[in-house]
Image: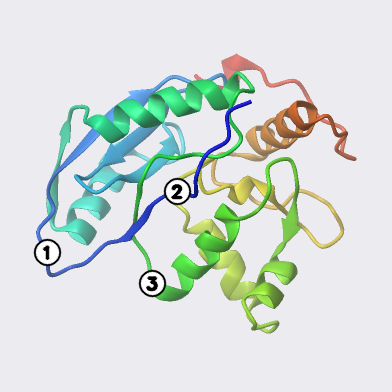
């Protein structure tokens, strides 16, 4: 079982031109994912059917003051390998550097998720309490929804206070699959009943 050091994080700045933002496709058991990377690290990892690619491209170019082009760099190669290890059950934490694009509050929420142990779950309320603001439940939920680096920043591990699944940008079926997969790899048994993922639903 491969363990890793804490993922390196870098916050995006508007004053520095980051130049080229490379993008590529990563095959996974849950369907292809789009990955984007700057010279500082991975800035996007989402399922290809989540949003129109052009929409994400425009957001990245505006936020990072750069140009999105097809290609691959060392970080994209690294994330492909680490995702392969994750889905084979060999990796529980990621090493690849990340390029955050978000407010200070959003980044605090995402950093909390990075520390959430593999095979476990939390709730928006617990996140808010951990961040020292129990009244910020809705803001925490919104920040989770703005996470653009799926799986690596594990927002799929956030469930409702009653234990039920809550919204997930990649779809609830993927969320069920990921939670079930991690619990099985950990040797635990998640309490929900999960459906087998049908590859045809990602087409």
Judged from the image, the secondary structure of the residue bearing numbered disc 1 is loop
Residue 125: % across, % down: 73, 71
Residue 10: % across, % down: 32, 58
Cβ–Cβ below 8 Å for labels 2 and 1? no
Near mark 2 (Cα within 10 A), the count class, few <14, some 14-19 or many ≥20, is some
Residue at 49% across / 49% down in the picture? 6
Image quarter hosting the N terminus: top right
Would you say 115 lies left or right of 46 here?
A: right
Residue 184: % across, % down: 79, 27
Give the residue at mark 2. 7
Q: Where residue 16 is drawn, which disc sits there?
A: 1
Judged from the image, the secondary structure of the residue bearing numbered disc 2 is loop
Label whose residue precedes the other's in the sequence (3 or 1) = 1
Give the residue at mark 3. 103
Pair 2/1: label in front: 2
User: Which residue is more in the foreground, 18 or 164?
Assistant: 18
Residue at 68% across / 48% down in the picture? 117
Q: Where residue 186 is drawn, which disc sits there?
A: none
Near mark 3 (Cα within 10 A), the count class, few <14, some 14-19 or many ≥20, is few
**Camera sees residue 30:** no
Near mark 1 (Cα within 10 A), the count class, few <14, some 14-19 or many ≥20, is few
Judged from the image, the secondary structure of the residue bearing numbered disc 3 is loop
- How far apart in space, not on screen, are marks 3 and 1 (Cα)? 17 Å
Pair 3/2: label in front: 2
Pair 3/1: label in front: 1
Residue at 68% across / 21% down in the picture? 197
Residue 53: % across, % down: 31, 37
Q: Is 175 above or below relative to 66?
A: above
Label whose residue precedes the other's in the sequence (3 or 2) = 2
Residue at 47% across / 54% down in the picture? 147
**Camera sees residue 138:** yes
Q: Is 53 above or below relative to 131?
A: above
């Amino acid at each position: 079982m491969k363990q890793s050091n804490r993922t390196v994080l870098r916050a995006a700045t508007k004053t520095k031109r980051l130049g080229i933002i490379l993008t590529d496709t990563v095959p996974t058991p849950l369907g292809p994912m789009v990955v984007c990377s700057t010279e500082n690290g991975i800035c996007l990892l989402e399922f290809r059917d989540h949003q129109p690619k052009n929409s994400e491209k425009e957001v990245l170019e505006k936020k990072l003051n750069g140009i999105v082009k097809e290609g691959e760099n060392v970080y994209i190669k690294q994330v492909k390998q680490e995702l392969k290890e994750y889905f084979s059950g060999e990796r529980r934490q990621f090493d690849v550097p990340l390029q955050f694009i978000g407010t200070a509050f959003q980044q605090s929420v995402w950093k909390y998720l990075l520390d959430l142990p593999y095979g476990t779950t939390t709730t928006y309320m617990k996140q808010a309490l951990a961040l020292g603001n129990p009244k910020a439940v809705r803001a925490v939920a919104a920040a989770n929804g703005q996470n653009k680096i799926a799986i690596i920043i594990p927002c799929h591990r956030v469930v409702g206070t009653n234990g039920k699944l809550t919204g997930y940008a990649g779809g609830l079926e993927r969320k069920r699959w990921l939670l079930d997969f991690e619990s099985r790899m950990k040797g635990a048994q998640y309490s929900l009943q999960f459906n087998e993922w049908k590859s045809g639903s990602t087409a």
